[in-house]
Image: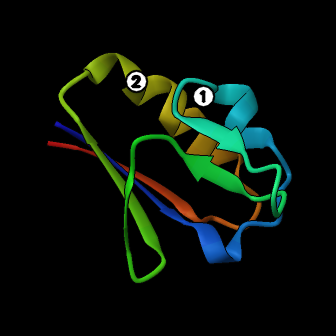
Amino acid sequence: MVIVTLQRDKCIGCNYCVEFAPKQFQMSKKDGKTVLIKSVNNKGFHTLKSHDHTITEACEQAEKACPVHIISVKET
């Protein structure tokens, strides 16, 4: 399982995550912050759990590119 977590409140809207993983991230037109698609929000932590391991590489690239380090990717 791949677990991707986003601390959305700390997002600065740089768009790097969308560039590297457009199937998992998109920018909100309301506030200019990123949205982790199909995630569950729990106290500001948006979490996506997926059995699709093909998303791992793109999400890890987004994690490394994020200048405020608000994305984490774990593979179990």
Indicate the position of residue 6 as horizontal and vertical percent values. Answer: 50, 61
The residue type indicated by label 2 comes to Ile
Q: Are marks 1 and 2 in contact (CB under 8 Å)?
A: yes
The residue type indicated by label 1 comes to Ala
For residue 13, side relative to residue 38 (left or right): right
Secondary element type, mark 2: helix
Q: Which of these two is toward me, 35 or 18? A: 35
Indicate the position of residue 74 as horizontal and vertical percent values. Answer: 29, 48
Q: Tell me the number on the disc at residue 21.
A: 1
Sequence-first disc among 1 and 2:
1
Indicate the position of residue 44 as horizontal and vertical percent values. Answer: 48, 78
Disc 2: CA contacts within 10 A as few (<14), some (14-19) or many (>=20): some
The residue identified by callout 2 is 55
For residue 36, side relative to residue 43 (left or right): right
Label 1 – label 2 distance at C-alpha? 8 Å
- Count every numbered label the image shows and give the total: 2
